[in-house]
């Protein structure tokens, strides 16, 4: 019997476990697994846990989440604390399915997977091969509490996390604070982090901020990237630690290098703008890209802006659109507006007013004020839907009633043009007058309504005064309107030189109508020196931008050699374009040309 006992001791569970551990140290996982299995089947809890880990990591055996869960749960049920902690963490991360749900089946509810930074070091590395699923908070709490009650600091941190961030029926912030405090007292990195974040919600003085910073510092020294990031934020603002952009940037860098998304964004911005570190836009953009690809919408929007704005190289709108779309699809309202404007202009993407309206609608619904105005302008051009018009008008009306002058202007335009509401020029004039005290566009619109007698008695003198206010601060449309009034003497003095100066200011900035006016005034018949060479140059500029009357006049100049250039074939080209746009007056000029010498 004594001999049998000695033989059993040589091949018992503990002996098998020791032999397995020696083989694992030598890297012989497959041979070690056989010994672990024998020890586990004999009821050794540690061996059961290690078998589960082998299945989870694919060490010496093909990976299997279901087998991993079965063996780890057996060890946890036998009281093996490390298995309890691991099983709780796996349930939180959604790596293993509960017994009553097949692997891959979704869990109902809105809970989000736990961040890896909140998980114990002992378990965080095993998630690399698995996609995170829906967390099982109730099941996780059961096992984490058992480990916590047994004195596990990791288990205590997990209980704190679940009671803080789990579903509403499990939340208990006071209890979480106590569990985090116990874990932190044992120097558990996750406990230190959790306790610091819990304490931060309660502190109101410098001493409290200093305690939070000290806890975060210990967690950061233990390698937790979230702690590094949070300490960086405190250091940037000088809360609990001396303010230092340099020290904050270094903390963001350390956390970024460990894959912390928000830290990658902050480190990228620091490099981009030279905040606490020498400016390096190229490297900064690279880190912002990483954060954007990891799902940070603000970083994606910043990268989009970098490409849209350009720098040493011309803008790349196609690349900008890719990043704006990534940010917009993640809910970034500014990026949605930017993408809408790209679709509106066709810069980098296909010009599509309906697609533009769709993105502007998203941005407006998210509260972007400028998107409301952009959508309203799109509606004025006949794009978008009737529902867009109603929603946009309602938003402008509500904001205008609350005293927003820009909204008052936009609401006035909606009333004047019948966008989302029946046209009412009288009310439109009232709202535009209210907005004109602070909005340049409203000054122009109200001035036009006075000059034209729309919604108010006609008063060209007062109308011209309002239009001049807008022109004096550089509004192109107001410059053109005021120039036209100076040309005719409507509402005040008549001055062709002053009119021409205003037309030229607007033309230089791309106003096509002003380019045509410059051509007409330079061509003679006005109280300014005639210069037909300049007239032809301005007509060409407007013609190339699609102005039909400019196309006709350029054709006449070229056909009749009015500016020293006789080119009947080029004249025919421009006259045909004018006719194609419906300008019947150009047909007579086209008929007067000699037969074309172009090949048939």
Image: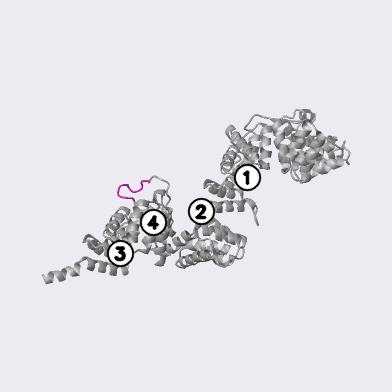
Query: Disc 1 to disc 2, how far (Cα)?
Result: 23 Å
Verify CB contact (< 8 Å) between mark 3 and mark 4: no
Q: Residues within 10 Å of mark 1 (few under 14, many from 20)?
A: some
Verify CB contact (< 8 Å) between mark 2 and mark 4: no
Q: Is residue 173 magenta?
A: no
The percent coordinates of residue 164 (x first, y second) are 43, 55
Residue beneath label 4, please?
A: 129
Q: Describe residue 596's horizontal placement relative to residue 114 as left or right.
A: right
The percent coordinates of residue 174 (x first, y second) are 42, 56
Residue beneath label 1, please?
A: 347
The percent coordinates of residue 581 (x first, y second) are 71, 31
Magenta stretch, residue numbers: 97-106
Query: Disc 4 to disc 1, how far (Cα)?
Result: 41 Å
Q: Describe residue 490's horizontal placement relative to residue 419 as left or right.
A: right
Q: Residues within 10 Å of mark 2 (few under 14, many from 20)?
A: some
* Secondary structure beneath label 4: loop
Sequence order check: which comes first, mark 2 or mark 4? 4
Residue beneath label 2, please?
A: 293
Residue beneath label 3, please?
A: 29
């Amino acid at each position: 019997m004594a001999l049998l006992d000695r033989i059993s001791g040589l091949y018992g569970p503990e002996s098998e476990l020791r032999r397995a551990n020696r083989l694992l140290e030598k890297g012989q996982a497959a041979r070690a697994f056989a010994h672990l299995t024998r020890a586990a089947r004999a009821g050794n809890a540690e061996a059961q846990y290690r078998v589960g880990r082998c299945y989870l990591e694919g060490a010496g055996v093909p990976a299997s989440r279901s087998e991993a869960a079965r063996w780890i749960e057996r060890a946890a049920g036998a009281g093996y604390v490390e298995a309890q902690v691991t099983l709780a963490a796996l349930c939180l991360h959604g790596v293993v399915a509960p017994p009553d749900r097949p692997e891959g089946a979704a869990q109902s509810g809105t809970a989000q997977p736990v961040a890896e930074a909140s998980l114990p070091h002992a378990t965080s590395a095993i998630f690399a091969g698995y996609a995170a699923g829906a967390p099982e908070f109730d099941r996780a709490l059961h096992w984490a509490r058992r480990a916590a009650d047994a004195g596990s600091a990791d288990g205590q941190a997990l209980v704190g996390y679940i009671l803080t961030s789990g579903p509403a029926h499990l939340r208990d912030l006071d209890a979480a604070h106590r569990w985090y405090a116990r874990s932190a007292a044992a120097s558990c990195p996750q406990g230190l982090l959790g306790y610091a974040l819990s304490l931060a919600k309660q502190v109101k003085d410098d001493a409290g901020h200093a305690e939070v910073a000290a806890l975060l510092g210990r967690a950061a020294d233990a390698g937790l990237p979230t702690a590094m990031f949070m300490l960086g934020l405190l250091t940037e603002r000088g809360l609990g630690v001396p303010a230092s952009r340099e020290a904050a940037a270094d903390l963001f860098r350390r956390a970024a290098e460990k894959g912390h998304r928000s830290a990658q964004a902050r480190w990228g911005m620091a490099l981009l703008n030279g905040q606490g570190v020498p400016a390096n836009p190229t490297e900064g953009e690279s880190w912002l890209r990483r954060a954007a690809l990891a799902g940070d919408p603000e970083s994606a929007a910043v990268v989009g802006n970098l490409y849209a704005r350009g720098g040493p190289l011309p803008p790349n709108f196609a690349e900008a659109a890719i990043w704006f779309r990534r940010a917009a699809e993640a809910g970034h309202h500014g990026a949605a507006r930017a993408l809408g404007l790209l679709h509106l202009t066709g810069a980098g993407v296909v010009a599509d007013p309906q697609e533009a309206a769709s993105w502007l609608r998203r941005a407006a619904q998210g509260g972007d004020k400028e998107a409301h105005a952009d959508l309203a302008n799109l509606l004025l051009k006949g794009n978008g839907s009737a529902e867009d018009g109603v929603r946009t008008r309602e938003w402008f009306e509500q904001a205008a009633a609350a005293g927003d002058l820009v909204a008052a202007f936009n609401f006035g335009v909606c009333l004047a043009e019948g966008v989302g509401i029946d046209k009412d020029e009288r009310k439109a004039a009232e709202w535009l007058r209210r907005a004109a005290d602070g909005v340049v566009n409203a000054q122009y619109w109200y001035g036009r309504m006075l000059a034209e007698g729309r919604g108010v008695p006609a008063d060209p003198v007062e109308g011209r005064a309002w239009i001049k206010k807008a022109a004096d601060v550089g509004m192109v449309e107001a410059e053109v309107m005021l120039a036209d009034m100076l040309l005719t003497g409507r509402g005040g003095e008549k001055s062709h030189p002053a009119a021409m100066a205003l037309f030229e200011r607007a033309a230089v900035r791309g106003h096509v109508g002003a380019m045509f006016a410059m051509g007409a005034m330079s061509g003679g018949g006005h109280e300014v020196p005639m210069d037909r060479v300049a007239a032809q140059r301005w007509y060409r500029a407007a013609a190339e931008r699609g102005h039909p009357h400019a196309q006709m006049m350029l054709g006449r100049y070229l056909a009749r050699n009015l500016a020293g250039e006789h080119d009947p074939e080029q004249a025919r080209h421009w006259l045909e374009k004018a006719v194609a746009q419906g300008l019947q007056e150009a047909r007579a000029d086209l008929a007067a040309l000699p037969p074309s010498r172009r090949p048939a």
